[in-house]
Image (cartoon, grey):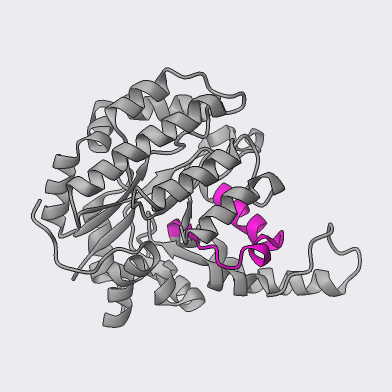
Amino acid sequence: MRLVAVEEHMATEEFLRAAHGLEVVPGDETETALMRAVETSPGTRARLTDLDARLREMDALGLDTAVLSLNPPGVQPYAAADAVPLAREFNDALAAVVRRYPGRFGGLATVAPQDPAAAAEETERAVGSLGLAGIMINSHTGGRYLDEPQFAPLLQAAEAARAPVYLHPRAPSMLAAYRDHGLSGAIWGYQAEAGLHAMRLILSGTLDRHPGLTVVLGHLGEGIPYWLRRIDNRYAFVRRTAGAATPMPRLSLTPSEYFRRNFVITTSGIDDPDVLGLALRAVGEDSVMFAIDYPYEDPATAAAFLRDAPLTDVQRTAIGHRTAERVFGIPPGNRSPS
C-alpha cells in the first residue's frame, strides 16, 4: 500500500544554530528551553537533521512520502525581527530538500504570525514559487490566536493560496495550571491547547469569514471528535437561552458542520483502533490522514497500526495516502529511488 505521512518534523543544523542563539520572548522561556534541550540531544538532533538516514528508515518501513515540517515551536518564540528572516531561510532550505528528493518529501512552510503581514507574504511565496504544500503554525503566538483580527491577512493569504494550515500543538498559553505534574506537554497540555485554538476558530465566526480555509489537526482531532455531539448540543442551548453563556457570534452552521467542512485530522501519536473508529464515524475517511509525528513516535508502530487496524480497503487507502494527496497536492505515484 502506498503510504504518505504528514506530521514529520525536521530541522537543519543552520536553523538550530541560529535559533538557539536568539533571545526568547517573555512567557515562552520554559517551553523553548525544553525544546532546545531535546534538539541538543545527539540522538534526536540526528533524527531531525539527517535526511539520508531518514530515507533509509522510510525505505525499510515502506513509507513512500513524508511531509516535513520544522520542529516545534518553530520561530514563534522569537521577536518578529528575528523570526521573519529565520522563517524565510528555513523555507528556502526545506524547498531545496523537496526538490532534491522528488516524490519522497513534501514540505510545510514555517511562518512568523507575530508579523501577520510578513506571514501572509511568506505563505504566498512558500506555496507559490517555493512549491511547498501548506504552512504549519504552532498554536498560539505570544498568547494570541488566529481568530483575532490582527491575523486576518495571514488567514486570507492561506485561503487564497489554498494552503492548508497545520495547527500544531505547543505548551498552553495559560501555563500556570499546567506547570505541575508534567501537564504542559504532550500528555495533556498540547491537545488542550490545540483543541482550544481550533474551537476558537469555529465559535468565533472565523470560518464564516474564511469558508475556504483548510485546517489540519493532529492526534485524531485533539479530542474534538469525541465532543462534537455535546458541542452542537450546548451551542444550540446557548443560542436559545438568554444569559446561558458569555456572548458568542451567531454562526451560519453548527460547530460540527464547520469541523467536517474545514478540518482534516491525522493519526499522529494515536495508535488506538477504538479512537480511530470514532474519528471515522465523526468525519469520514476522506478527512483522516496518516501521520507518525516523527521523531517523537515510533515509525514502525505507527505503520503497523494502520496496517492492522480493522478498516475497509477504501478506508485504509484514504488514510494511507489518498486524503493527503488531495489536501496537500501530493502527486500520486510509485516510490522514487532514494
Residue at the extreme left: 337
Q: Is residue 216 magenta?
A: yes
Q: Is residue 165 visible?
A: yes
Name the residue: 71% across, 62% down.
205
In the foreground, 70 or 239? 70
Q: Is residue 301 above or below residue 32?
A: below
Q: Write down the region rendered in magenta.
A: 193-219
Name the residue: 91% across, 63% down.
243
Q: Is residue 266 left or right of residue 237?
A: left
Answer with the quarter of the image where residue 268 lies: bottom left
Q: Is residue 183 visible?
A: no
Q: Is residue 174 left or right of residue 59?
A: right
In the foreground, 300 or 116? 116
Name the residue: 64% across, 51% down.
152
In the foreground, 290 or 223? 290
Q: Position of residue 208 (x, y in %)?
A: 67, 67
Q: Is residue 8 above or below residue 115?
A: below
Q: Is residue 286 magenta?
A: no
Q: Position of residue 163 (x, y in %)?
A: 46, 57
In the foreground, 100 or 108? 100
Name the residue: 24% across, 43% down.
97
For the N terminus, which image quadrant? bottom left
Q: Is residue 154 left or right of residue 21?
A: right
Answer with the quarter of the image where residue 81 lies: top right
Q: Position of residue 280 (x, y in %)?
A: 44, 75
Q: Position of residue 159 (x, y in %)?
A: 54, 60
Q: Is residue 306 above or below residue 124?
A: below
